[in-house]
Amino acid sequence: MTNKFNTMISLNYILRYFLDKYTLPQIQIKNDAFYLFLRDTHMPFTTKNFQNTNRENGPLPLSRFRIARFKYIISLINKSIADKNKCDIIDLGGTPEYWKNLEYLIKGKEINVTVVNLKKFTSETTWISCIQKDATDLKEFPDNSFDLVHSNSTIEHLRSWKKMEEFAREARRLAPAYYIQTPNFWFPYEFHTKMIGFHWLPKLLRVKILMKRATGYYPRANTVEEAMHIIEDAHSLTHKEMSCLFPDSKIIGERFCGLNKSWISIRSDNK
């Protein structure tokens, strides 16, 4: 059992190395790559914008996956602006920093972002507002109050299927278009604990591991209760579960090494 555990830990570190090298670190986008990205998303390219982004603000705090994801978001934003001359976005579970980091890509567009999070955030940026609220209960906003619902890696933290259904119901009614991203349950690397196959292990074994060592974003659990809270904190979703929660969407798989790393549910405003 000890040898198998040590082998699993070794494989975990190997995969973490490649993930950190190719997807997770902050990266400096080269001129050519930056131009191609703007070209593919039909956004204007200016040397000044590129120089400001790289020299004044330093490396972009975005993974390659996040950059690739944003082309879908830009497409939805551009469609809304083309149809309505604006795009009001509600970000469920997001942060203002995420949008500030992307400001150079949406500068000059008529965009307003409302960030909803259980944590309290503030923003000095006029086009970003923050609300401390449960994203599963936003009844103060009528149907289609926004043009686009956005959410990255939030729905898997809701702890129960009932809460996920409530979240999905709000996302589907708040805007005619939405973008929802979440990790794939069947991808072998569990991103929250940063371990291979952790989410596939029996619950009792996961409790033992969590009480033995710190894992990923979580400190070592001192009690079984603490370990169970960590286990319940994140539940990655399958393609079937995403299809059930968002039946009117197109589900796209983000691929890494030939495997679907995460799912993106996209519904475009076809009105």
Image (tube, rainbow, N blue to C red):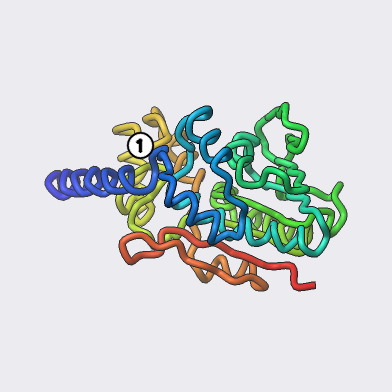
Foreground residue, 112 or 44? Answer: 44
Foreground residue, 247 or 123? Answer: 123
Residue at 47%, 55% in the rendered image:
183
Q: Is residue 51 left or right of residue 81?
A: left
Q: Quadrant of the C terminus?
A: bottom right
Q: Is residue 88 left or right of residue 16?
A: right
Which quadrant would residue 39 be assigned to in this image? bottom right
User: Where residue 13 sits: x, y (%)?
Assistant: 24, 43
Foreground residue, 254 or 55? Answer: 55
Q: Is residue 100 left or right of residue 111?
A: left
Residue at 71%, 29% in the rendered image:
123
Regarding mark 1 in the picture, which secondary structure is present there?
loop
Residue at 29%, 45% in the rendered image:
16
Q: Is residue 15 visible?
A: yes
Residue extending furthest toward the front: 47
Residue at 16%, 50% in the rendered image:
4
> Looking at the picture, does residue 157 appear above or below residue 76?
above
User: Where residue 237 sits: x, y (%)?
Assistant: 50, 60
User: Where residue 142 sits: x, y (%)?
Assistant: 87, 54
User: Where residue 164 sits: x, y (%)?
Assistant: 63, 56
Residue extending furthest toward the left: 3
Q: Which residue is mark 1?
A: 215
> Looking at the picture, does residue 22 appear above or below residue 270?
above
- Residue type at the position of mark 1: Thr
> Looking at the picture, does residue 210 appear above or below residue 252?
above
Are there few (<14), some (14-19), or many (20+) residues within 10 Å of tag 1? Answer: some
Q: Is residue 205 visible?
A: no
